[in-house]
């Protein structure tokens, strides 16, 4: 993940903290102005408050279930993203697939 300025260019001076979550849903629907949808599942990734380094963020997380419709949600409070904070979701949906599958009869 990267922090972008108002022109959509990497802001390599940003070092604030943000809460990064995986959100997933079971049914299709609309997104809000922040590209977020009402999730059926939410999982906070990487200790709930992760610091950006030179405008870039790396998160680590294990997701134990498969989800056909997921996004990443970033919440930055007013202290780290003045004046009023930022909530945004990735603009594209993605799927989380199982590492393996077994079929038996």
Image (cartoon, rainbow, N blue to C red):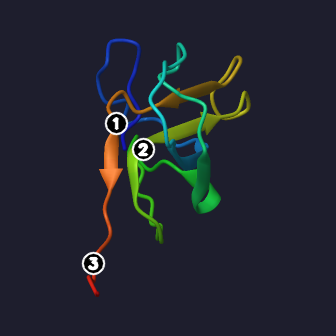
Which of labels 3 and 2 is toward the front?
3
Q: Position of residue 83 (x, y in %)?
A: 70, 17
Label 2–label 1 contact, CB within 8 A:
yes
User: Foreground residue, 89 or 103?
Assistant: 103
Q: Position of residue 50 (x, y in %)?
A: 57, 54
Question: Residue 101 — which label?
Answer: 3
Point 26% across, 82% down: residue:
103
Point 54% across, 16% down: residue:
32
Whether residue 84 is situated above or below residue 10 in the rendered picture: above
Q: Quadrant of residue 10?
A: top left
Point 48% across, 72% down: residue:
64
Whether residue 37 is situated above or below residue 105 in the rendered picture: above
Residue placed under numbered mark 2 in the picture: 70
- Number of marks in the rendered image: 3
Q: Residues within 10 Å of mark 3 (few under 14, many from 20)?
A: few
Q: Position of residue 19 (x, y in %)?
A: 62, 47
Q: Earlier in the sequence, mark 2 or mark 1?
A: 2
Residue placed under numbered mark 1 in the picture: 93
Q: Earlier in the sequence, mark 1 or mark 3?
A: 1
- Callout 3: helix, strand or loop? loop
- Callout 2: helix, strand or loop? strand
Q: Quadrant of residue 85?
A: top right
Question: Label 3 to label 2, Cα distance in Å?
Answer: 20 Å
Question: Label 1 to label 3, Cα distance in Å?
Answer: 23 Å
Point 62% across, 36% down: residue:
75
- Callout 1: helix, strand or loop? loop
Whether residue 59 is situated above or below residue 30 in the rendered picture: below
Question: Label 2 to label 1, Cα distance in Å?
Answer: 5 Å
């Amino acid at each position: 993940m990267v922090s972008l300025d108002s022109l959509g260019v990497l802001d390599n001076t940003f070092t604030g903290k943000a809460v990064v979550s995986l959100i997933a849903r079971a049914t299709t629907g609309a997104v809000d102005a922040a590209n977020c949808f009402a999730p059926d599942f939410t999982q906070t990734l990487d200790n709930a408050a992760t610091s950006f380094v030179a405008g870039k963020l790396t998160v680590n997380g294990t997701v134990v279930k498969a989800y056909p419709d997921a996004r990443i949600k970033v919440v930055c409070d007013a202290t780290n993203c003045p004046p009023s904070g930022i909530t945004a979701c990735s603009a594209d949906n993605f799927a989380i697939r199982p590492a393996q599958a077994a079929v038996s009869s």
